Amino acid sequence: MISSRTYVSELERGIKTPTIEKIEELCCEMGLHPLTLLSLTYLQGKTSKNLKKLLRMIENEANEILNEKE
């Protein structure tokens, strides 16, 4: 087990703030990609329409950054 129940509970209540490494560990344990968890957290309480809009925005921003490197 990578985290105690107490730690996860503190994350859920906003008492603790996880590092990127801890998010990756938790996601691996849950069988999720970290971006999935972060997107769902960001979209809390919103619809699948909002998810599609967010994913398009992420794709566009990532493509812009990748194109700048070329």
Image (tube, helix red, strand yellow):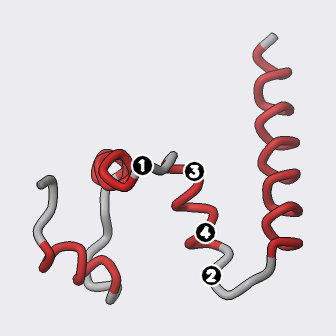
**In the displayed structure image, the side of residue 49 where residue 62 appears, left or right:** left
**Residue under the point 87% across and 51% down:** 56
Q: Of marks 4 and 3, which one's residue comes earlier in the chain?
A: 3
Q: In terms of secondary structure, where does tag 3 sit?
A: helix
**Residue under the point 55% across and 61% down:** 38
- Residue 51: image tag: none
Q: In terms of secondary structure, where does tag 2 sit?
A: loop
Q: Of marks 3 and 2, which one's residue comes earlier in the chain?
A: 3
Task: Place residue 4 in its image quadrant.
Answer: bottom left
Quadrant of the frame with the C terminus = top right
Q: Is mark 2 in CB contact (under 8 Å) with mark 4?
A: yes
Which residue is under mark 3? 35
Q: Nearer the viewer, mark 1 or mark 2?
A: 1
Using the numbered discs, state the Cα–Cα distance from disc 3 to disc 2 in whole angstroms. Answer: 14 Å
Please name the amino acid that badge 3 sits on: Leu
Which residue is under mark 1? 31
Placement of 63 over or under 57, stated as above or below: above
Which residue is under mark 4? 40
Using the numbered discs, state the Cα–Cα distance from disc 4 to disc 3 in whole angstroms. Answer: 8 Å
**Residue under the point 80% across and 80% down:** 47
Using the numbered discs, state the Cα–Cα distance from disc 1 to disc 2 in whole angstroms. Answer: 19 Å
Q: In terms of secondary structure, where does tag 4 sit?
A: helix
Direction front: furthest residue = 31
